[in-house]
Image (tube, rainbow, N blue to C red):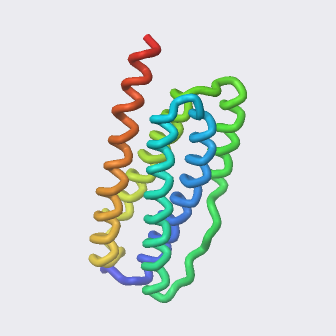
Amino acid sequence: MATRYADIPVLNHIATILTDARRLYHRAARLADDDRDVVNRIELTLGERSMLLTEIQERMRTLGEPPKPNGSMLGAAHMAFLDVRSVFERDVKSALVEVSRGEKYLSDELRKAMRREDVSADTRAFLGVVLDRIVSGEMRFAGKREEVEHRAL
């Protein structure tokens, strides 16, 4: 049975992923600094994810829970990996791979949350709209990633 009590942890989990994603995308933009098109795509996505984070936090407030602004240990590990990788591979492809991985993880977690029966219908509908916006970001990077990989051949 769906209750609003399940909504808060789900929304907080997605907010945590978005917090991690924003940090990761800042670093990825620095990796891709020699390709203005990729940097622009990352910055556009970064802005969109920041707006989504604000919307999710507002929804949490509406449900009576203050948002928790911290990222996760997994996100910190992912960023450390990206920092190490950037020492060896300071390139556009690495940036695109990391952003694509972040977008995929976010969309996978949204799909899992939407399948939960204990989440209210309102929150599932809200997450569906969020997912649509994430998928458009995934597509933005998939095409560019194919182009960059094709150039490298």
Q: Is residue 14 left or right of residue 137?
A: right
Residue drawn where x is 66% and y is 55% of the image: 73
Farthest front residue in view: 36
Q: How many marks?
A: 0
Farthest top residue in view: 153
Q: Nearer the viewer, residue 113 or 102?
A: 102
Query: Picture quarter containing residue 147?
Result: top left
Residue drawn where x is 45% and y is 50% of the image: 44
Q: Is residue 72 left or right of residue 124?
A: right
Rendered location of residue 68, percent (x, y):
60, 74
Rendered location of residue 20, percent (x, y):
58, 55
Q: Nearer the viewer, residue 102 or 13?
A: 102
Asked if 107 appears above or below 35 in the picture, the reply is below
Asked if 18 appears above or below 78 in the picture, the reply is below
Query: Picture quarter containing residue 112?
Result: bottom left
Asked if 49 appears above or below 4 in the picture, the reply is above
Residue drawn where x is 52% and y is 30% of the image: 35
Rendered location of residue 56, percent (x, y):
45, 72
Query: Picture quarter containing residue 30?
Result: top right
Q: Is residue 121 left or right of residue 100?
A: left
The N terminus lies in which quarter of the figure? bottom left
Q: Is residue 95 left or right of residue 142?
A: right
Q: Nearer the viewer, residue 47 or 142?
A: 47
The C terminus lies in which quarter of the figure? top left
Rendered location of residue 123, percent (x, y):
34, 75
Residue drawn where x is 40% and y is 38% of the image: 141
